[in-house]
Amino acid sequence: MDVQDYCSGMAAELMAWKAKIFDVAIKADNLGTAEKGRVWESFNELKIIVKDLEDKIQTLRHECPSEWSPQKQEIDKASVDMRSRYQETMDYIGKAAPVSVPG
């Protein structure tokens, strides 16, 4: 896989993650004040991870290095971190929700 194909795929994946993260914000509105605070903390961390991934992908697109495995490893690790944080947040929303929150 070349760097441009990888970046295009990751960019598309990030678009889907942005929608999921927006969904977190909507679901958090159904929570009490204390629970909302914890979810917003995770929400902000997710936004930071997404922004970092976008920056890394843009850099790869513009530089197009012949050896880009170190950057790929950083992006892949950040992607795993994002998935983990998202799942933790959704689990917390499910436990804290006053009623069942589909999702």
Image: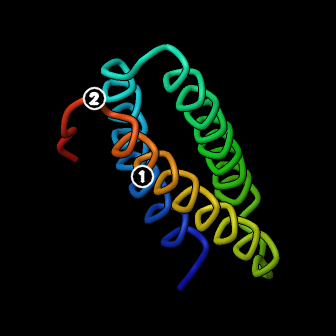
Neighbor class of circle 2 (other Cα within 10 Å; few <14, some 14-19, many 20+) is few
Q: Is residue 5 above or below residue 15?
A: below
Q: Quadrant of residue 84?
A: bottom right
Q: Is residue 53 above or below residue 28?
A: below
Kindly state the secondary structure of the residue where label 1 is placed. Answer: helix
Question: In the shown orientation, is residue 67 left or right of residue 37?
Answer: right
Residue drawn at point x = 46 percent, y = 61 percent: 8
Disc 2 versus disc 1: nearer the observer? 2
Q: Quadrant of residue 98?
A: top left
Q: Which mark is residue 98?
A: 2
Q: Which mark is residue 91?
A: 1
In depth, the one of 27 and 76 nearer the eye is 27
Residue drawn at point x = 38 percent, y = 31 percent: 22
Residue drawn at point x = 57 percent, y = 53 percent: 85
**Residue 19's spot in the image, x, y percent?**
34, 39
In depth, the one of 65 and 26 nearer the eye is 26
In depth, the one of 39 and 4 nearer the eye is 39
In depth, the one of 87 and 67 nearer the eye is 87
Q: Give the CA separation, mark 2 to mark 1.
A: 14 Å
**Residue 103's spot in the image, x, y percent?**
22, 47
Neighbor class of circle 1 (other Cα within 10 Å; few <14, some 14-19, many 20+) is few
